[in-house]
Image (cartoon, rainbow, N blue to C red):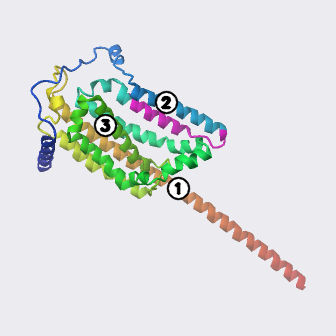
């Protein structure tokens, strides 16, 4: 473990040292104090229109579409679990971007890491589990589906982006590219860059989890064994990235290094906590996803077995029916001969 930690530390420092601007002597400002009571914590919720309006619009549109589809198809209603999953995904985005987590994401790297985990590991798979594309297809009129939705689903761009290898690489590349480049430190000081970073995290996470959940139609449909491998292979890269952050002997981002904060852990200890959170929660999430896929695989095999047994029973019943008919015909022929 010693050589690995040394190499990871050297790689992380080399990348950051060559790409990030040097830490300046002047501090970036005074950190906000921690809340002293629950009421003060509640007051830290923000309502950024760029975040709040899309979230509210998505929730209202979802509920309206579900009601319309259920009214039109009472025998084939939208499963309640999909609505719960989708709205829970929106709630995770709300928690990540509007709660006190957002208030301290530029103060503590560990809080910033929780924000990213909520977006990529919680919100994205929950939204995918809601099957929003399926609901859109069921809700929209046939002409709208043919003219707008299906061409997009069958477009070359989407086929490239959703190709499993591309989606896997994009997920990993955005994680490494943002954490080991000037982008991360810039996002801590430029709100627009910060919001663009969050959008990138959510988009690549949705692309990654889409074929894993498998609730929506996709240009590429992976078999269950490939889904297990697809998710499992994300664990090593997540672990190496987390170790590179955790094992660094220097603070990676000038913003956190120069922030005047008189409370909480040191910048380096906070960075180690962030790396630990990425390592533990990330790997546990991927492991849970592997178990979910294996469970879905077993259920699919059980359903296939039931269908196979039903088909064989039907074929056997048909054979027995024909045997009875043949026996009756032979009996009649023998009776006629007499």
Vertical arrangement, residue 207 with respect to residue 113, above or below? below
Q: Earlier in the sequence, mark 3 or mark 1?
A: 3
Q: Give the residue pinned by disc 1.
A: 302
SS at mark 3 in the image:
helix
Q: Residue at x 23, y 44 (%)?
A: 241
Name the one closer to the observer, 303 or 55: 55
Q: CA distance from mark 2 to mark 1?
A: 39 Å
In reply to whether residue 254 is colored magenta, the answer given is: no
Q: Residue 172 in the image: x percent, y percent? A: 29, 47
Q: Residue at x 43, y 55 (%)?
A: 156
Q: Which mark is in front, 3 or 1?
A: 3
Q: Is residue 248 left or right of residue 193?
A: left
Q: CA distance from mark 3 to mark 2?
A: 22 Å
Vertical arrangement, residue 104 with respect to residue 128, above or below? above
SS at mark 2 in the image:
helix
Quarter of the image for residue 263 reads: top left
Q: Which residues are magenta?
A: 72-94
Q: Residue 101 in the image: x percent, y percent? A: 31, 26
Q: Residue at x 69, y 66 (%)?
A: 317
Q: Check disc 3: other Cα within 10 Å, few if <14, some if 14-19, many if 20+.
A: some
Tell me if I can see residue 119 in this picture.
Answer: yes
SS at mark 1 in the image:
helix
Q: Residue 324 in the image: x percent, y percent? A: 77, 72
Residue extending furthest toward the front:
147
Residue 57 marker: 2
Q: Give the residue pinned by disc 3.
A: 197
Q: Is residue 235 left or right of residue 160?
A: left
Q: Which mark is in front, 2 or 1?
A: 2
């Amino acid at each position: 473990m010693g050589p690995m930690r040394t190499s990871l530390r050297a790689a992380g420092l080399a990348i950051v040292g060559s790409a990030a601007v040097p830490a300046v002597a002047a501090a970036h400002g005074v950190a906000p104090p921690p809340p002293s009571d629950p009421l003060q914590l509640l007051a830290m919720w923000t309502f950024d229109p760029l975040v709040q309006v899309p979230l509210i619009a998505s929730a209202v549109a979802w509920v309206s579409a579900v009601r319309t589809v259920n009214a039109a198809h009472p025998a084939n209603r939208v499963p309640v679990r999909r609505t719960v999953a989708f709205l829970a995904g929106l709630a995770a985005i709300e928690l990540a971007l509007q709660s006190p987590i957002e208030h301290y994401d530029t103060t503590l790297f560990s809080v910033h890491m929780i924000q990213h985990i909520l977006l990529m590991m919680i919100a994205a798979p929950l939204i995918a589990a809601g099957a929003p594309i399926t609901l859109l297809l069921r809700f929209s009129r046939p002409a709208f589906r043919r003219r707008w939705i299906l061409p997009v689903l069958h477009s070359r761009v989407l086929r490239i982006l959703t190709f499993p290898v591309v989606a896997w690489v994009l997920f990993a590349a955005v994680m490494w590219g943002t954490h080991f480049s000037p982008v991360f430190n810039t996002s801590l000081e430029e709100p627009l860059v910060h919001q663009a970073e969050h959008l990138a995290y959510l988009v690549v996470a949705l692309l990654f989890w889409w074929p894993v959940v498998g609730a929506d139609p996709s240009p590429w449909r992976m078999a269950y064994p490939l889904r297990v491998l697809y998710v499992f292979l994300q664990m090593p890269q997540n672990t190496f990235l987390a170790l590179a952050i955790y094992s660094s002997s220097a603070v990676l981002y000038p913003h956190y290094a120069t922030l005047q904060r008189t409370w909480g852990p040191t910048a380096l200890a906070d960075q180690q906590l962030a790396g630990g959170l990425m390592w533990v929660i990330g790997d546990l999430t991927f492991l849970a996803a592997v178990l979910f896929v294996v469970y879905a695989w077993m259920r699919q095999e059980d359903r296939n077995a039931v269908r196979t047994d039903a088909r064989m029973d039907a074929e056997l019943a048909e054979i027995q029916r024909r045997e009875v008919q043949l026996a009756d015909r032979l009996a009649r022929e023998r009776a006629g001969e007499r």
